[in-house]
Image (cartoon, rainbow, N blue to C red):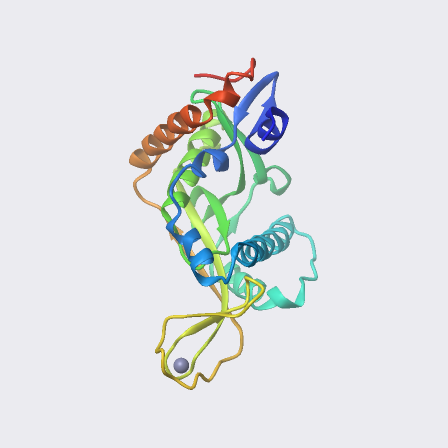
């Protein structure tokens, strides 16, 4: 990778400084879930296609949800309709207030003390508590999500006015699958191929309609998570030192 690609991929140029990106830093973590793609696929390109397809699914869902949060009327792609319906239902059952949708959805945040930047999904008040929300379309909530959201919360609060400060962080996970009426196995199509998890190995699966599910989870343990994130940042800097040495405006804290 060339230095320009590295800078483009891993950070932001803000006020004459180059700051590393939250998701670049968390990519240093071991991701056991990733191996699954390779183990499940006949070869490397097939695994890559599944990963790309899952990422595309995530982007598609993100775009629609974020546009809805900005008050736009959206006609979602047919394949994600169960997800979007589940999200609408979740919204009807919760009181979510976004004070400035233009600013608070897809918001660039800079941690001016620890020197990193990122784009958080949503800042909102949900059922009376103000927090940072990260949207996910994964099949679960993983360790890296704890570090990522801790980083966003820390960065956001650095520049927020007193009454705008957030006290927590959540994952809003939107999932979609068919479920076997007999053994409760789940079948998802997000990877471009159908994938079955759980349930019984030997079962003449009877698949339900596609259904969307929302998991809204508050993440506890901010203090240890931000500490771990900053440690990950150091490790990331060490790992990428050959590049970082060549960035004269690297924002070292
Ligand atoms: Zn079954």
* Quarter of the rendered structure image containing ligand 1: bottom left
- Say above or below: 82 vs 7: below
Is 126 on the left-hand or right-hand side of 54?
Answer: left
The part of the image, by quadrant, that contains residue 78 is bottom right
Residue drawn at the location 53% of the way across and 24% of the way down: 19
Residue 21 on image: x %, y %: 52, 31
Q: How many numbered callouts?
A: 0
* Residue at the far top in the pictured view: 248
- Say above or below: 95 vs 29: below
Residue 190 on image: x %, y %: 55, 63
* Residue sitting nearer the eye, 60 or 9: 9
Residue drawn at the location 56% of the way across and 21% of the way down: 18
Assign the N terminus to one quadrant of the image.
top right
Q: Is residue 128 in view?
A: no
- Say above or below: 183 vs 63: below
Residue 45 on image: x %, y %: 57, 55
Assign the C terminus to one quadrant of the image.
top left
Residue drawn at the location 48% of the way across and 54% of the way down: 95
Q: Is residue 222 in view?
A: yes
Residue drawn at the location 44% of the way across and 41% of the way down: 130
* Residue sitting nearer the eye, 39 or 240: 39
């Amino acid at each position: 990778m060339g230095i320009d690609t590295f800078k483009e991929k891993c950070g932001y140029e803000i006020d004459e400084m180059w700051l590393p990106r939250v998701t670049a830093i968390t990519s240093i973590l071991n991701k056991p879930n990733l191996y699954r793609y390779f183990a499940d696929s006949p070869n490397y390109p097939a695994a890559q296609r599944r990963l790309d397809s899952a990422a595309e699914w995530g982007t598609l869902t993100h775009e629609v949800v974020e546009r809805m949060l900005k008050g736009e009327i959206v006609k979602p792609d047919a394949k994600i309709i169960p997800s979007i319906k589940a999200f609408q239902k979740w919204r009807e059952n919760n009181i979510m207030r976004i004070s400035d949708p233009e600013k608070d959805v897809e918001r660039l945040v800079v941690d001016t003390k620890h020197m990193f930047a990122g784009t958080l999904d949503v800042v909102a008040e949900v059922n009376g508590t103000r927090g940072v929300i990260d949207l996910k379309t994964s099949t679960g909530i993983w360790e890296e999500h704890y570090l990522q959201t801790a980083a966003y919360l820390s960065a956001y609060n650095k520049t927020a006015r007193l009454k705008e400060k957030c006290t927590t962080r959540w994952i809003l996970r939107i999932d979609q699958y068919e479920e076997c009426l007999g053994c409760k196995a789940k079948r998802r199509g997000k990877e471009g191929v159908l994938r079955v998890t759980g349930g019984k190995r030997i079962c003449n699966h009877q698949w339900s309609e596609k259904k969307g599910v929302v998991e809204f989870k508050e993440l506890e343990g901010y203090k240890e998570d931000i500490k771990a994130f900053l440690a990950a940042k150091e490790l990331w800097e060490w790992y990428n030192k050959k590049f970082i040495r060549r960035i004269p405006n690297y924002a070292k804290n």
